[in-house]
Image (cartoon, grey):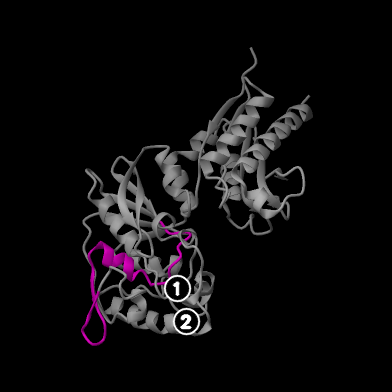
């Protein structure tokens, strides 16, 4: 009796279009159209940005608590729970996708306080002794002071005036926090981020990433100046973290995690370990991965390349075929990815291509064709 074709679908989200799970499920549907007897495993993944909670909730559970976004607007906030570990993500409550537009005015008003409040709720869940915080996709450059204030820190400006976390005075970093008392959590905290930038300087949170979040040149320099004051305040509080790799991640949230005594880890590697992705991939004959765009940067450690590397490294038998699917393919990444395929069969506008129904349909159709081609090549 011939063993069924074993397929793993481990795609990252198609940002603005499909979540990781939705993309994986679309590919699964296409595989089963080609080979109804196939054994198909869906393994949602993320790199610490949007979709991190969803990817890990698949291996545990999901709770929802009242939260606020980076402008203080009330919203439901998700927390994934895996045993003693709670998982939250900045993209859900402090993500740039929560903003209708970005501009210097908006950049002056946003903060990460809502993420701190969400972390506090996560720590209050029964049995939780560790919190994973996905740091990707944030829309604020506040050095992580909002996050710390939301968690219960206290901070003051140079005149001794307290700085609040309610957002009523705008981005708290611009109040130039000169003194801070960092709370003791009584639990471990891990930030998930692939960015290794320091807090300050040309590659730091304000100058490197501030413009992406709406800051113009004058505001970038104001943020950098305030960030220097904030770095000194953290050092005075016993957290000299500004120069450490990753301190500038997510507008400075990396520095806040480090100031709490936490650690920073590459997002995909940690998520893969939490869900046992290597074990899931070990017996696969065919692996589908992918994300919105495949280009020359994909081979530099982005999710599809890492999934492919892991699939080949963990194979118990013959090397699996690895196919990456994307809305746009600008270059073949090579390495352990055997082929990168664009999913759209006809030219489309960006709005049409990102329509979730269209993207899901095209993913399924492309996966179906790919499976048939792989099987035909083996005959």
Give coordinates of residue 140: x percent, y percent. 43, 68
Residue at the far top in the pictured view: 1
Foreground residue among 198 and 166? 166
State whether residue 193 is above or below residue 129: below
Q: Name the N-terminal-most of marks 1 and 2.
A: 1
Give coordinates of residue 259: x percent, y percent. 31, 68
Quarter that holds the N terminus: top right
Disc 1 to disc 2, C-alpha distance: 9 Å
Q: Which residue: 22% across, 50% down?
A: 124
Q: Which residue: 24% across, 46% down?
A: 125
Residue at the far bottom in the pictured view: 159
State whether residue 64 is above or below residue 30: below
The answer to whether 203 appears left or right of 348 in the picture is left
Which stretch appears magenta? 134-163
Is residue 335 visible to the viewer in this orientation of the structure?
Answer: no
Q: Residues within 10 Å of mark 1 (few under 14, many from 20)?
A: many
Q: Quadrant of residue 319?
A: top right
Foreground residue among 107 and 375? 107
Q: Quadrant of residue 35?
A: top right
The disc at residue 223 is none
Count numbered badges in the picture.
Answer: 2
Give coordinates of residue 251: x percent, y percent. 44, 69
Q: Which residue: 34% across, 83% down?
A: 229
The answer to whether 318 appears left or right of 122 in the picture is right
Q: Residues within 10 Å of mark 2 (few under 14, many from 20)?
A: many
Is residue 37 visible to the viewer in this orientation of the structure?
Answer: yes
Residue indicated by mark 1: 107
Residue indicated by mark 2: 219
The answer to whether 248 appears left or right of 25 in the picture is left
Pointers 1 and 2 in contact (C-beta within 8 Å)? yes
Tell whether position 202 is magenta: no
């Amino acid at each position: 009796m011939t063993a069924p074709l074993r397929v793993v679908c481990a795609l990252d989200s198609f940002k603005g279009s499909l979540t990781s799970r939705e993309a994986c499920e679309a590919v699964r549907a296409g595989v089963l159209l080609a080979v109804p007897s196939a054994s198909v495993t869906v393994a949602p993944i993320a790199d610490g940005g949007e979709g991190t909670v969803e990817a890990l909730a698949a291996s545990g559970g999901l709770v929802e608590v009242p939260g606020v976004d980076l402008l203080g607007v009330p919203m439901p906030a998700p927390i994934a729970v895996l045993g003693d570990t709670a998982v939250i993500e900045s993209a859900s409550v402090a993500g740039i996708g929560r903003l209708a537009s970005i501009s210097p005015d908006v950049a002056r008003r946003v903060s990460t306080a809502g993420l701190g409040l969400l972390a506090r709720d996560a720590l209050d869940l029964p049995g939780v002794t560790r919190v994973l915080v996905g740091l990707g996709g944030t829309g604020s450059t506040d050095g992580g002071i909002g996050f710390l204030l939301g968690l219960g820190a206290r901070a003051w400006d140079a005149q001794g005036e307290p700085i609040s976390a309610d957002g009523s005075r705008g981005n708290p970093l611009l109040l130039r926090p000169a003194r801070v008392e960092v709370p003791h959590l009584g639990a471990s905290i891990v930030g998930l981020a692939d960015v290794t930038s320091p807090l300050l300087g040309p590659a730091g949170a304000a100058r490197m990433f501030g413009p992406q979040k709406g800051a113009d040149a004058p505001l970038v320099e104001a943020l950098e100046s305030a960030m220097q004051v904030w770095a000194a305040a953290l050092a005075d509080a016993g957290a000299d973290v500004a120069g450490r790799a990753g301190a500038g991640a997510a507008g400075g949230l990396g520095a806040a995690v480090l100031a709490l005594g936490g650690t920073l880890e590459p997002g995909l590697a940690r998520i893969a370990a939490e869900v046992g992705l290597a074990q899931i991939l070990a017996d696969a004959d065919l692996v589908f991965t992918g994300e919105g765009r495949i280009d020359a940067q994909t081979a530099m450690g982005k999710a599809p390349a890492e999934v492919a590397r892991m699939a080949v490294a963990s194979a118990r038998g013959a090397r699996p075929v690895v196919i990456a699917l994307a809305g746009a393919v600008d270059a073949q990444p090579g390495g352990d990815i055997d082929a990168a395929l664009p999913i759209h069969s006809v030219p489309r506008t960006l709005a049409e291509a990102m329509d979730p129904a269209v993207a899901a349909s095209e993913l399924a159709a492309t996966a179906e064709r790919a499976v048939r081609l792989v099987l035909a090549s083996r005959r």
